[in-house]
Image: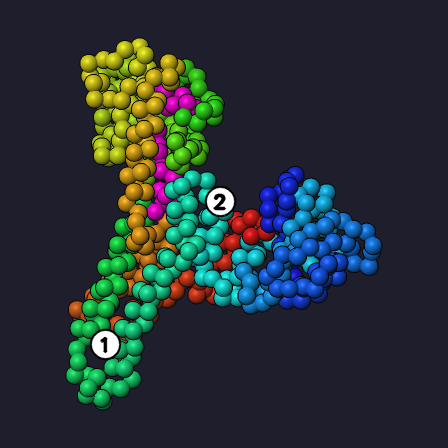
Amino acid sequence: MPIAALSTAPGAAAIAIIRVSGKGCLPFLEACLLRRSPCVARRMQLATFHPPGSGEIIDEIMVCVFPAPGSFTGEDTAELFCHGGPYIVQRLLQTLWSSGFRPAEPGEFTRRAFLNGKMDLSIAEGIKELVEASTHQQWLAARHLATGRFAEAIDSLRAALIEALAYLAARIDFPDEGDVQDVDLGLVRAKVDAVLQKILRLERSYTSGRVAAQGLMVTIVGQPNMGKSTLLNALLGHERAIVTEQAGTTRDYLEEPCRIKGRLIRLIDTAGVRETTDMIEQRGIAQTRRLGQEADLVLLLIASDATARDRAAASVLMQELGANKCLQLLTKADQGIPEWAQDFLPISCHAEQGLERLEEEIVRRVDGYVGQLNEEPFVSSARHLHALQSARRDLEAFFEGHAQGQYDELLAFELQNAARALSGILGAVDVEDVLDKIFRDFCVGK
């Protein structure tokens, strides 16, 4: 059934764009239009919009028609450019919905484009991320997907595996042909090894790609009353976490997106780490340790008035989480900087001291990851990473099987599984709920 939806943001605007698509949609649309000139495909033309059979003119619009298959969705499609008043937009949509169209579901235009072969699944995911990108680093990751560069790299790997499979198939199907059996598997091994090495490089790129797409994961840790929640509020620029003098106020973690100098970070405030018999607080502390281990950057806080026991506990926590990713911050630095804290970054949220230096250090960390991304393909999606890891395990099983002298049929099975895993990235999937999961978070009209 043809679909129709608003493709621009809701609310008052100078111009709004309504998109329609589907088999038979153009006759339905033409019944609502009074044109000044005959319809010409892919040309903006002036028309008046009215309910079918009515002389009432709702709006004067510009309309552009894209016949199938030369459209975004691969179906007959049209875009209507009307005045952006909410009443006008709603009247146009209600008229379309009562004239043969139905409201589009989230992501349905892009989903139809995928199903009609206009793009693969990774490109569709890139389009969604382009729409949602709010920073340069997100745009970089989204554009990498949306332009098809990543898809080309994956398709090249899949093609190389299929070529290796073709050789194995010849050995299996024609066992009596001497010219096939006399040649060893060296050529196949070389092709498969080249694919494996490229997959390993892609896997290694995921951390930088994830930071670009999702932001740097920054976890604030420390003992109670070291100023963790105060720092969270200061970096966010508003009060998000409750701050009190009572130890253990924060028992669960808080995660908030935050932009610092145009860079996206995921800022996480955690429960203070200490010995406690409170079961709820114990669970919060366990989460703190997990989030610290998962973080790209740990802000380890210790106050200027901390005791020797506090400092020893902080040192143990830093070793546990990884000293290389921990940035030690001295809080309450306006009260003085003790001798033992000369190597710490001093900050005071109350006096607004040191926050600029802290932000510069966070920006440097973000740029350190994103700066590693170049013209080479990289991975920014967990779904893509899992598929690559599955393919890599299959290829490793191929080499193990070859070393053990397994039959060609078993070796071919491993290569088939690896090729299938790579195909899943591009959308060669036959499970409907996989598509539902990907497209459900799209905005309506896209």
Query: Which image quadrant is residue 272 in?
Result: top left
In the rendered structure, the answer to whether residue 101 lies left or right of residue 225 reads right
Tag 2 secondary structure = helix
Q: Which residue is mark 2?
A: 132
Q: Quadrant of the image for the N terminus?
A: bottom right
In the rendered structure, the answer to whether residue 443 lies left or right of residue 27 reads left
Q: Nearer the viewer, mark 2 or mark 1?
A: 2
Q: Which mark is residue 407?
A: 1
Query: Which image quadrant is residue 79 in?
Result: bottom right
Q: Position of residue 333 (x, y in %)?
A: 30, 15
Tag 1 secondary structure = loop
Q: Nearer the viewer, residue 272 or 184?
A: 184
User: At 23% from the left edge and 64% from the top edge, which residue is drawn?
Assistant: 194
User: In the rendered image of this protein, does residue 228 appear above or below residue 336?
Assistant: below
Check contact, mark 2 vs mark 1: CB within 8 A: no
Part of the protein shown in magenta? 209-234
Mark-to-mark CA distance, 2 and 1: 49 Å
Magenta stretch: includes residue 216: yes
Magenta stretch: includes residue 386: no
Q: Position of residue 343 (x, y in %)?
A: 21, 22
Of pointers 2 and 1, the one earlier in the residue sequence:
2
User: At 38% from the left edge and 27% from the top edge, which residue is drawn?
Assistant: 271
Q: Position of residue 170 (x, y in %)?
A: 27, 82
User: At 42% from the left edge and 33% from the top edge, which residue is drawn?
Assistant: 259
Label 2: few (<14), some or many (≥20) within 10 Å? some
Q: Nearer the viewer, residue 286 or 96?
A: 96
In the rendered image, is residue 221 in sight? no
Residue type at the position of mark 2: Glu
Residue type at the position of mark 1: Tyr
Q: Position of residue 378 (x, y in %)?
A: 32, 52
